[in-house]
Amino acid sequence: MKIFFTFLFTVSINLINAQETGNLIYTNPLSSESDLDSWVMEGVGETKFSNGWMQMFSPDEAAHHVYWCPVELPASFVAEWEVRNKHPEAGLCIVFFAATGKNGQDVFSSELKPRNGIFKQYTKGDVNNYHISYYANTPSQKHRPYTHLRKNSGFHKVQVGKAGILHYSEKTHRVRLVKNIGRIQMYIDGALIIDWLDDGKQHGPILGAGKIGFRQMKWTRFEYRNLRIWEFPKK
């Protein structure tokens, strides 16, 4: 069994280092309001657009917020997007993925309780998902130098990773998220910061297909562009 997991790890690393992808299943430049027609904002969040970038923020830093992509992603995928920080004084960026209701409902189902960006609604409520915090510079955790991967519902911290985007950086960063069934990896500018294999036992079954969404705490002003999602490469 140990040999098998070592082999799986090696194959997965080689695939992503080679920047291989499968068929493109979703692409969005995030460069204008019309690009976001079907997206769903939860919480007091707004967007504005300039020079090909979508900036997301909460007016007057009123509330945390989550912006959901409307497409259902398969159980295995590769997603990539670019970000840059317009407010390095404070903020936090999270990506939710493989998100569904606890009984497999679509994350937008009327069967689920209403959500407005409050964290526990996504981590201890009636939604299952994985999430990674790849930028963290909050009033309670200034300049946090590592990433967190959690499995929800339950807020299970399953891995503390390497540093993601540094708190002071205002340059453009490329984020790559890889989900191959239960193996989850994240890269920032090509550097591996998260690498975890869900055994489907300790914290419940492996999460499969579902939605992806971007969450920000209310102090955050990040810009996003060029979201692309592929099937996981088949060999």
Image (cartoon, rainbow, N blue to C red):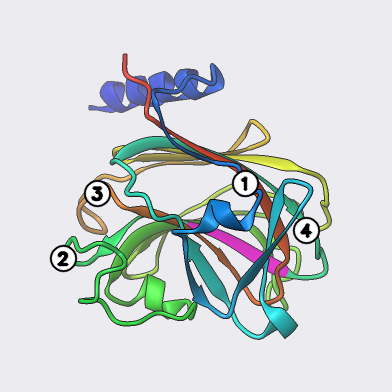
Label 4, residues with CA under 10 Å away: few <14, some 14-19, many ≥20: many
Residue at position x 32%, y 77% in the image: 125
Displayed quadrant of residue 73: top left
Residue at image x 20%, y 76%? 111
Task: Pick the quarter of the image with the C terminus.
Answer: top left
Residue at screen point 73% across, 66% down? 221
Residue neighbourhood size for the residue with mark 1, other residues' Cα within 10 Å, grouped as few (<14), some (14–19), many (≥20): some
Task: Give the residue at mark 1.
Answer: 162
**What's the CA distance linking mark 3 and mark 2?**
14 Å
- The N terminus: image quadrant: top left
Image position, residue 211 (x, y; %): 36, 54
Distance between mark 2 and mark 1 Cα atoms: 33 Å
Mark 3 or mark 2: which is in front? 2
Distance, label 3 to label 4, CA atoms, is 32 Å
Which residue in the protein does label 2 denote? 103
Query: Which mark is first along the chain, 4 or 3?
Result: 4
Quadrant in the rendering for residue 10: top left
Of helix, strand and loop, which one carries label 4? loop
Which residue has dot 3 on it? 206
Q: Which of marks 2 and 1 is nearer the N terminus?
A: 2
Q: Mark 4 points at which residue?
A: 167
Mark nearer the N terminus (1 vs 4): 1
The total number of labels drawn is 4
Find residue 225 and report its horizontal and vertical position in percent. Answer: 65, 46
Tell me, yes or no, whether the two marked residues, 3 and 2, touch with CB atoms within 8 Å.
Answer: no
Q: Is residue 208 above or below residue 90?
A: above
Decide whether the magenta segment is chiefly helix, strand or loop: strand
Kindly check if marks 1 and 4 are in contact, taking CB atoms under 8 A apart as contact: no
